[in-house]
Image (tube, rainbow, N blue to C red):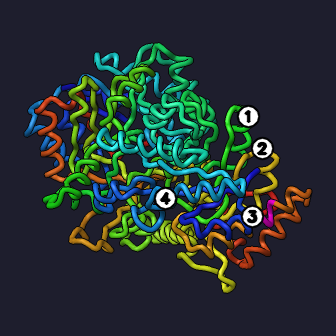
Amino acid sequence: MKILAPIRALDELEMLADAGAEELFCGIVPREWQDRYTGAVWLNRRAPVGGSLETWMEMRELADSAHRRKLPVFVTLNAPYYTADQLPLVLELARRLSEECGVDALIVTDVNLMSRLSEEKLNAKLHVSSVAASLNTEAIRFLLNFGPSRVILPRSLTLAEIGELARALAGAVELEVFMLNDGCAFEEGYCATTHHHSVGAFCTSLSEMEADFEWHAPVFTNRRRNWLKRNLADYREWVWYLNGNGCGATPKGLPYGPCGLCAIPDLQRIGVASLKIVGREASAFKKMASVRMVRDIVDRTRSGASKLQVIERARSLRDQPEHCNAGYMCYYKVEGGP
Amino acid sequence: MEWCVHIAGPSDLDAEPALARFATLETSGKLHDSVRRAAESVAAAFGDVRFSRCAFGNEFCEHLTPEPGAVAAAAGAAAAREMGFTLLTPYVSDAGLARLRGIFHILDDAEVVFNDWGVLNLLRREFPHLTPVQGRLLNKSLRDPRVMGIYGDSQAATAAAAATLTALQRSNADCESYTALLARFGVRDVEMDNLPQGMDLGFAERGVRLAVYLPFGFIATSRVCMAAGLHYRKADKFQPGAPCRHECQSHLLEYSYTNSPFGNRDQKFWLKGNSYFYLHTEPMLASLFDHARSGHIARMVFQPRIPMGLS
């Protein structure tokens, strides 16, 4: 079970490696893409500027330096779709990433791109992005037609469901799961909205909109109306947690946001291959702090600490028991957890 | 062009399947007028349309998957009216897939709209007599009504803005290699929403049969359902796939885009259960009808109710 960390620039590499990262993922948005489109069309699920590398030289140096530290590098080509105009550019990007830069895997959502890349026989492996919404065993079996070595499971799968998938697939493909930092109120692969800075994420935008209930029965009592309003307030609180507790940090500067630390012993038992820390665009400090937290728990799990010891340690690392107790900060409900 | 109506059950077909009657079925005071106006626009553009097919089922929530008996009854009512039958299916967990398997067993000859690659895989392996249709959730165009209509209205003054709008008006179906891939898996029909930013349907000229829904468009959907939270204690609310009591059937939530940075602060979105929807505007309907007249659309699917009913 590896720790997968996001990276945006070569100068983050040493810090992330020293903190305990064992795999890295990043994006690249070359100048050609930025020149072709405005900021409304995203190559890799991040705004064109600020979340990705921008030059081939940077990409090659990052891959070479990471490989010297024995860290594989995966690159996102995970837009939900590419048009016929875009596909040649994206295929060329994939070829160069694989054959010139030597990156280890390409993270892909679009089954058309997966299919085309599987025909290319590149050195880089294929990882199926969480945006592909592989929610059931049959969906993963379908995607195996394109030869991926790994499937990144959507955040919305429960531990029990992940366990069932792992059992049914019996090692046919590696499974990667979300571990820290980024939530999504919707099923990521079935959300047709944009996070463009002009409007922000739809889920958080909704929390600031006027909302009016309509009751589909003869009598809409005040009691019922208040019941619905309370539930809406709870839902908005849940979205606030998903959004990194309003993009906040603890007094010690540690990142808030969805967390799967308590589930690490279960995920190890299930046979999950990799734990993903989200946030290519995050600050270097947030990335380092995130990797350190995950590494601490993974090391304890690897050394045989009991599940309860791990949970206790995870809660102390988060350092904000009231947020853990709320139950809205967890990717996975864990027996014995909050 | 074929017309299809999304029915809630066999009783929707008790009387003649007429657009004017379907236009009265939405009981929500917040939605009724919009559905009626859309139906009137359809009638003005196409006259007295004849529904030769009906759709039944749900695209968004596995907890709203109908029982096999209800599917059999709906299919029987369609057959009695000599209408084709299409079963709509949602994205699913393994448990949801098992329920669908039970339904597929009772279907002799029908279309099945899949919105999950796992459903397609199951259909191909175990139910090759059923005709798979790619659903609108697997059409990956952005359709965020907060902003996409504004892109569509822009003059695309620069080359980059024009290329951006073109990309946003297309989808995965734009690539010939994609539709060829679908064909390899036995899929020749695809569905989509009418996009607020306009649609480039050039791909339909390659022989792909396209169905478009109206008047509701889908925005986002989730395995976490706000309505299902109503009967849980606070700390246990909003768990993915959590069992529910179909609380979604009791109410609708209407949002007003009061925090828009643009001029569209009167824009509305609707949450029913786990899914958000927009309604077509008059210009969107006009654009859709233009596409229909140009021959790009093989089928229109009229949904008289917000498509989250329990059948």
* Residue A304 falls in image quadrant: bottom right
Instruction: Using the numbered discs, state the Cα–Cα distance from disc 1 to disc 3 in whole angstroms.
Output: 26 Å
* Residue drawn at x 60%, y 53% as measured from the top left: A155
Q: In the rendering, which numbered label is found on residue A57?
A: 4
Q: Quadrant of the C terminus of chain A?
A: bottom right
Residue ID for mark 3: A20
Packing grade of label 3 (10 A; few <14, some 14-19, many >=20) is many
Please name the amino acid that badge 2 sits on: Gly
Magenta span: A294-298
Q: In the rendering, which numbered label is found on residue A271?
A: 2
Contact between labelled residues 4 and 2, with CB atoms less than 8 Å apart: no
Contact between labelled residues 3 and 1, with CB atoms less than 8 Å apart: no
* Residue drawn at x 34%, y 51% as measured from the top left: B142
SS state under label 3: loop
State whether residue B154 appears in this view. no
Closer to the camera in the image, A234 or A39: A39
Instruction: Using the numbered discs, state the Cα–Cα distance from disc 3 to disc 2 in whole angstroms.
Output: 20 Å
Residue A208, horizontal then vertical, whole percent: 40, 74
Instruction: Using the numbered discs, state the Cα–Cα distance from disc 4 to disc 1 in whole angstroms.
Output: 36 Å
Instruction: Using the numbered discs, state the Cα–Cα distance from disc 2 to disc 4 in whole angstroms.
Output: 36 Å
Q: Is residue B13 left or right of residue B75?
A: left
Please name the amino acid that badge 4 sits on: Met
Lower position in the chain sequence, tag 2 or tag 4: 4
Instruction: Using the numbered discs, state the Cα–Cα distance from disc 1 to disc 2 in whole angstroms.
Output: 9 Å
Instruction: Using the numbered discs, state the Cα–Cα distance from disc 4 to disc 3 in whole angstroms.
Output: 25 Å
Lower position in the chain sequence, tag 4 or tag 3: 3
Q: Is residue B7 left or right of residue A146?
A: left
Say which of marks 1 and 3 sits in front: 3
Lower position in the chain sequence, tag 1 or tag 3: 3
Please name the amino acid that badge 3 sits on: Gly
Closer to the camera in the image, B39 or A130: A130
